[in-house]
Structures are given as structure tokens and as C-alpha cells.
Amino acid sequence: MNKLETSIGALKLKNPVMTASGTFGYGEEYSKFIDLNRLGAVVVKGISLNPMEGNPVPRIYETPSGMLNAIGLQNVGLKVFIEEKLPFLRRFDTKVIVNILGNTVEEYVELARHLEEAAVDAIELNVSCPNVKKGGIAFGTDLSAMGGLVEQVRAATRIPIITKLSPNAGNIAEFARVAENAGSDAVSLINTLLGLAIDPQTRRPRLANITGGLSGPAIRPIAVRMVWEVFRKVKIPIIGMGGIMDSDNAIEFILAGATAVAVGTANFVQPDACERIVDGLECYVDENGLHSIREIVGGMII
Amino acid sequence: MSRSFEAVVTENREVAVNHFRLTLAPDQEVTLPAPGQFYMLGITGGTDPLLKRPFSLFRLGKNGAINILYRVKGKATQIMTGLQPGSVLNLLGPLGNGFPNVEGKRPIIVAGGLGVAPLTALAESLRFDSPRIFVGARYAGDVLATDILSSIDSDISISTDDGSMGIQGVVTDAVNEYLASAGTSAQDHVIYGCGPRGMLRALAGLSDRYGIEGYVSLEEYMACGVGACLGCVTKTAGGYRRVCKEGPVFRIGEVIL
């Protein structure tokens, strides 16, 4: 029996390790460095109906134990994704979760319908990207707007829906509860924390977008705390993320209440980070005499 | 062959004020790099600095030794100066696309400042095509690798902003003079450049004026180095392209400088 097997609603995963959207492209680049078959799921770069150009450069800047990014959701758009990117990912024995974003409820609904037809395994509603003015975050910072969006997408599709929550929007547990009540199968958290770095010499912001999303180990304690807060408020599964670099970090999230974890910035540092984390989790369950990783979800001892 | 490997530091020597040459011996058989390709170097294995840093191939040494030329600029390069022989670093590479070979054309190699790093590898590979080499820097202390380059082109042209070495002025003026004196044979050349954006823009102007094909290598902040994060894009006629994946070498005319 596979001790790492878990599930996000109806979505069965061979292990709880997935890639975080926006850090793994559409899987092609990293397939040269890791065996995608070993991943629980690949969560692809956010997809919009039409291609998006993204923000001007500089788009990234490293900060202590973290990085700021303001990519601006550059993506190939739905059509190219389905025709050119998805078939590649389908060659692997891993689940494909598609992160989607739009400016209106109708756009999300249309994306969800087409992706269900294309037989993706789940969709992740991006309502929390901090780096674009329109869309995404407009839904993620308003409880009723987000609830309405999730309801409409829920009504339009039967595939599992994951709502990705922002840490920049007030009480994250409230948003999680609204997502749950509106029919979301799971929540994923946290998206990046809004940050700013300034060059003291030029007095200009380090990023062309001025602000950017902070990720990496610097944000991990905040992310773990938020997972724990959400875990106490909702019954649906949580996908925890924020600065996971190794399997111990992943265990931390699981103990706080995450059913699965997503690895983001660590991929940039070590292209085989996800595979190492799967290895580490296998060791952990054996060393701790667990029958299943699920035994320790929310298992923090107080 | 995996493009992710470990390499042992065999030498880390200050070759000019604030500039070091790092020599790395891969621990396994690795893919041979082409001039213009680059490596992502893991500096500490810790979280600060967190990301790997991109460095282009400066020279390929004996037994596949990878030589990197770096300027001490920020935290990561400061830490790099302390690397001792025997230290083990994690590398990704070779990454990106190198400079293309253009048959039947005489290469004009134009390096600004640290742009000399990838162009030294190129000059060595084009040694038998009689490349003309032009090097520009702010002052004499920033003129690098001329010992190697002058062994390839004995007529190497050096320009400095303050005139402390070679001609006083910008390197592209020297290139312009050369092309102007070449008359109709100017079109028998191909330009390869790496350096500050201003210099690359001037090179693009020369490429246009003399109707010469040219290629430039760009620099940008990178996180992943393999095309996934979309952090290092540059504007081209066809929209944003990734410097790490479609570049770092772009054709002049395609890239918007």
C-alpha cells in the first residue's frame, strides 16, 4: 500500500507533493531535471482565456531568504495551452491541475468548461495574484465576490475546484469558509505576500511593477500559521504552501493541517526539489511508523 | 547527460581589481558548453543567497573545466570570493543558446566591460576565422582578458572612457571606424556583442547602417534559469522572450534593445 497516497476531494493523489502554480511553467522545462511521474500533481502556470504579455522587467528581485516577483501572469492562453501544452503533461502519470484567472465571472466559467472538456484533473481558481490590477485579486479580497465566483464555477463544472487564497486580504480563514460554503472542494494557501524593495542608490523600486509577491523560506512561518488558522475553520482539504524547501518543511504544513503541499520557489533553487521532498516524506512515514501520511494531517501536538 | 551536477572549485583567483576567475571541475561527464551558454551556480546551499546565479562560460579548460569570470557586485559574488579550492558547488547547465556560427563571414567581436566573459569563449572557438576584437571598458582596471584576446587578434582594439588604456572613447566608435574603412567589404562581417544595453543599441545601429548580420548576448535577473519562471524576459519584435531559454543570444533586429 502506498503510504503517501492522499486525496483532495474526489482527486486521488499518489502523494501529497505538487508544484506551485507559476513556478513550474507547463512542466516541460523541469521534465529534463526530474521525473514528473513521481509528483502528486503538476499545477501549471495560470491560464487566461487569451494570452497575456505580463509585466515589464525587472520582474524578480531576491530578498533575504526569499524573492519578490511581479511576472504579471504572462501565459499562452487557453487555446495554446490545451493544444500544445496539455498533451505533453498527459504523457506522465501525474495529475494535472490548471490554475485559471479572469477579469469576470464569465471568463472563469468559460475556462472551467473548456478545461473540463479537455479532461484536466482539477482547476485552481486564482483569486489572489498580487501583481495585476484587473482580475484575480479583485475576487480574492472581497468575501461576497469570491463566494459568487466559486458558486458560478461550481455550477458550471464537475471537476474538483481548488480556491487559491491570498494572505493579503484580511482574515484568510473567513475567505476559506466562504470558498467552502460556495462549493470549493479544497483551498490552497498561501499565495505570495505583497512586498516592496527599493534601491537606495537610484531610489527606484527594484521591480518595474513597484510591488511584487514575496515567496520563499522568509514567508514560511506566516504560511504555516495561516494553514493552521484555516484548518480550524473548514472541513475541506487544504493545500499548504509558502517557502517549502525540504520534506521537514512539508511535514510542518501537514502538521498544521495541510492534506497536500505545493512547492514553488524551491524548484528554482533545486530543480529536483519536489522529488527530494517525496523521498523525504517516504522516509518520514517509515521512520515514524505511520500507515498513511494522512494520519498526521493537523497533527500538531499542543 | 544531466544538466544538474556538482563541481569542485580548483581555483578562485583575483585577476583584476574586484574581478575573479573561478575554475570548476565537474564531478561527472557533463554536456559540453557552446560559447554564449551559461550556468546557474548555487553559491551556498543555504537560503541567503537563495537563488542560483547565472554566469556565462568564460573559457573551457582542460578536462572540461568550467571557467567563470565574475565581478564582485553584491552579496552572492562577495561570498564567492571566499570560495576555496575543494569547495563543492551545485550547477545547472550549460543553459540557453550560444552564438551561432555564420559561415563565410569575418567575425567582429565587441565586448563592453564584463561582456568580455562569453566573448572570450567565442573568440577562442573562432580563432581560425581571424576575428577582429574590440574591447571597451570604463578604465584600464576594467579591461579584462586581453592577454587571451590579443593572442587571437594581434590588432585588438581597446577603448576606455577615460583614456587610461587604448583609445579614449566608446568601443562602438572604434568599430564604426573599422567598418567605414572596410568600404564595401564591411558586409563580409558578422557582429557578436555583449555589454551594457547602450553599447548593444549602438551596435544594432552599426549593424543596420552597414547591413551586417549581428548577435548580442543579454543579461537579466534570473530565478530558475531554465525557462519556467518567466522572470528574465526581454522585449522582441514578437513579444517577450525568455533570456534564459530563447536567449541569452539574440539576433540583432529581433530583440528590442
Image (cartoon, rainbow, N blue to C red):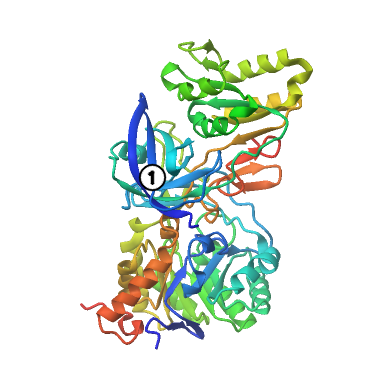
| Residue A254 in view of the camera | no
- Comparing A51 with B193, the one in front is B193
Res. A217 visible in picture: yes
Return the residue nearer the eye: A85 or A225: A85
In depth, the one of A192 and B106 nearer the eye is B106
Q: Is residue B135 left or right of residue B202?
A: left
The reply, left or right, for residue A219 in relation to residue A132 is left
**Camera-side residue of A151 and A81:** A81
Q: Position of residue B1 (x, y in %)?
A: 50, 57
In the picture of the structure, the residue carrying the numbered disc 1 is B25
Disc 1: which chain?
B
Q: Position of residue A113 (x, y in %)?
A: 67, 77
Q: Is residue A250 left or right of residue B196?
A: left
The correct choice, above or below, for A13 with respect to B193 in the image is: below
Q: Which picture quadrant has residue A158?
A: bottom right
Q: Is residue A192 above or below residue B81?
A: below
Q: Position of residue B137 (x, y in %)?
A: 49, 21
Residue ID at (68%, 79%): A117
Position of residue B190 relative to residue B32, above or below, is above
How dense is the environment of label 1, judged by Cα within 10 Å: few (below 14), some, or many (20 and up)?
many
Name the image quarter holding residue A294: bottom left
Locate residue B30 relative to residue B133 in the image: left or right: left
**In the picture, residue B253 is in which quadrant?**
top right
Secondary structure under tag 1 reads strand
Position of A152 relative to B194 (above/below): below
Callout 1 amino acid: Ala
Quadrant of the snapshot with the C terminus of chain B? top right
Residue at point 52% right, 55% down? B229
In this rendering, the count of numbered labels is: 1
